[in-house]
Amino acid sequence: MVFTNAEIDETIQMFRSQKLDIRTITMGISLRDCASASGAQSRQKIYDKICRYAENLVSVGEAISLEYGIPIINKRIAVTPIAMVAEASSDKSYVAFAHTLDAAARQTGVNFLGGFSALVQKGYTRGDRILIRSIPQALAETERVCASVNVASTQAGINMDAVRQMGFVVKALAGRTASTQGLGCAKLVVFANSVEDNPFMAGAYHGPGEGEVVINVGLSGPGVIKSALENLEKAPFDTVAETIKRTAFKITRMGELVAREASRRLNVPFGIIDLSLAPTPAVGDSVARILQEMGLERVGAPGSTAALALLNDAVKKGGIMASSHVGGLSGAFIPVTEDEGMVEAVQSGGLSLEKLEAMTCVCSVGLDMIAVPGDTPAQTLSGLIADEAAIGVINHKTTAVRVIPVPGMKAGDWVEFGGLLGGGPVMPVSTLSSKAFIDRGGRIPAPVHSFKN
């Protein structure tokens, strides 16, 4: 891959003033060969394998960052969904497996390890049931472990029993981590159509269709896109889309350079580049501000969904032009607490939970990092999950819910999580009851357009 001097200068400017970074280098590791009838033996195999493969992950990431002058913010690990590995044992709780993962994460120095997960879109196995029951205690007692549960897919429909259960799991986890304002819920994602190669937390896991070990890289760069649009005040949308596409192309080429170098040094196959515009609480690193550059007074104004659709599509097109290995989620995230522009829109009253839900029809993922009142009923949380799952299933896209019912707080209160998780106002949730709907259980069938064979 050859870069001109002008391209190098432009990229340096992106790093220095536009907050471009490699958000994460994530090593995916298969644990399928760690299953054992003995839980203790299985956990030892898991710990040994993670530490063997990932022992140099952090040092290699730091070396590449130093040598190339490229900020690499996080180094992470994703593993096979633990429900698939642990169910070979006779254990009746998987909390001990979570502690093993946490110990391996500390030993290797990564900031998060994803894969305390279950895939239940069409039904439960014994291991799935145990893992989901273990989530509140497991995430409350560990620091770096992240969990996810896939409750729906376009091919299978929506497992409403799992949707109902996850509302109670989120509620219980918030209660167990009340001393940190329900922060444990920031480590749990409920998916529809989850992907096997997502490098971002909290939803990363190493899918069963993946190889033994792989390097996936997640990019960011909302500030770069915003900067590219600043001189296009009256340009037509054709020009806006083309500008975003070209900018995404440049970002992706830089990301592939890092991914292939990490792959070479670690002697691990290169997997995918995930070009997701992942914002941070820092000013100038906001997806919301990109939408405002297109002419919206604030996110939430009429036109917000159309603007986000244009952004998401152009980012994907630019990434695909630049690399044959674009995967993961690739698009624009719209978390609330992690994006200062989104926080301002909520504070001003311009952005509601209902408008956010509409925007998730066209963005990457869904209702993300949203603080809600601590007394929100579990079935209401399940209703939010069901709505997002329906959007994902019908639109054949990944959607997710990462919602935090903050114990003791009400709508309008301010919650602070710190770091990349940021902070923001507690958003009001409809007080209309979803209980009778959620308590039906069963499965919402797959849509007719799922039958493509």
Image (cartoon, helix red, strand yellow):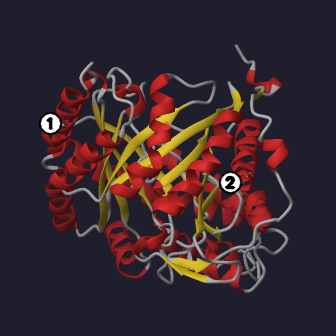
Q: Which secondary structure lies at badge 1? A: helix
Category of crowding for the residue at label 1, using alpha-carbon neighbours closer than 10 angstroms: few (below 14), some (14–19), many (at least 20): few
Q: Give the residue pinned by disc 1.
A: 48
Q: Is residue 363 left or right of residue 30?
A: right
For label 2, the residue is 378
Name which residue lies at 77% across and 71% down. 352
Frontmost residue, 308 versus 33: 33
**Horizontal and vertical percent position of residue 377:** 71, 58
Is the C-beta separation of discs 1 and 2 under 8 Å? no
Q: Is residue 60 visible?
A: yes
Q: Is residue 54 left or right of residue 231?
A: left
Query: Callout 2: 10 Å neighbours few (<14), some, many (20+)?
Result: many
Looking at the rendered structure, the kind of residue marked 2 is Ala
Q: Is residue 266 left or right of residue 248?
A: left
**Count of numbered circles on the image:** 2
Q: Which residue is nearer to you in this view: 342 or 119?
A: 119
Q: Is the residue 296 above or below the residue 84 in the image? A: below
The residue that appears at 64% across and 49% down in the rendered structure is 167
Q: Amino acid at mark 1?
A: Asp
Instruction: Identify whether 339 is placed above or below 131.
Output: below
Between 188 and 77, the one nearer to me in the picture: 188
